[in-house]
Image: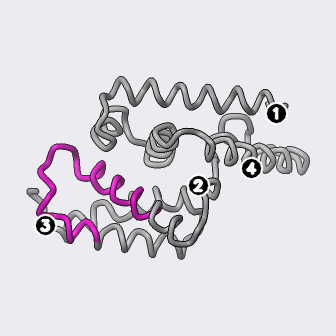
Amino acid sequence: MDKSFEEVYKAYYNKVYYFLFRLTENHHLSEELTQETFFRAYQALYRFRGECDIFTWLVSIAKHVYYDYLKKNKLALDSISLSLVADTYFDETEMTQEETVQEEDIKNAAKKIISGLPKKYQDVLILRIYAGMSYEQIGKSLKITPNSAKVIYFRAKKMLTEELENENYL
């Protein structure tokens, strides 16, 4: 790694925090998980070989920190808020109260559906949606090809949409 750890921390702290905040929707928890992510990254720095970019490596660590938190606190993956669903189907600038309630219903249904997907689909959705990672970055992070990441993402999105349609949310 060409950068000092302090430079990496300053350069990527906000991005890692934002990734975790999108998962938790809790500022305090996101702050704690971000700190834990950088602590683990510092401890594992000697293992970073530069096979992926630093952000991809940090997000992979952050994802594991988040999963560890869920396991430790006996929370299910359905705690993930799916703003993707709301962003896709609603224009928040002109939402009525009824649309706001409908949005919450769709988010809750989507959470349940995603928690039932196989882990590889969950992982790809989280990395693509919340970390904004490219398929190449996702592939490196999950040790799959970029094409596989793309296929998995589109299949997961299709499963989610179909299930929401079957349950009459869309």
* Sooner in the amino-acid sequence: mark 1 or mark 4: 4
Q: Main secondary structure of the magenta part?
A: helix
| Element marked by disc 1 | loop
Residue of label 1: 167
Alpha-carbon span between mark 1 and mark 4: 12 Å
* Whole-percent x, y for residue 100 in the image: 83, 49
Residue of label 4: 108
Q: Residues within 10 Å of mark 2 (few under 14, many from 20)?
A: some
Is label 3 in contact with label 4 (beta carbons under 8 Å)? no
Amino acid at dot 2:
Leu
Give the image quarter of residue 58. bottom left
Q: Nearer the viewer, residue 159 or 32?
A: 159
Is residue 61 toward the left or the right of residue 119 in the image? left
* Whole-percent x, y for residue 130 in the image: 49, 48
Residue of label 3: 4
Residue found at x 10% / y 56%: 1
Alpha-carbon span between mark 3 and mark 2: 34 Å
* Whole-percent x, y for residue 168 in the image: 84, 31
| Magenta stretch bounds | 40-66
Furthest residue toward right: 98
Residue found at x 22% / y 46%: 53
Residue of label 2: 77
Q: Is residue 31 above or below residue 96?
A: below
Please identify, in this view, whether the residue under mark 4 or under mark 2 is nearer the observer: 2
Is label 1 in contact with label 4 (beta carbons under 8 Å)? no
Alpha-carbon span between mark 1 and mark 2: 20 Å
Amino acid at dot 1:
Glu
Alpha-carbon span between mark 4 and mark 2: 12 Å
Q: Is residue 25 above or below residue 122?
A: below
Amino acid at dot 4:
Asn
Q: Is residue 153 above or below residue 55?
A: above
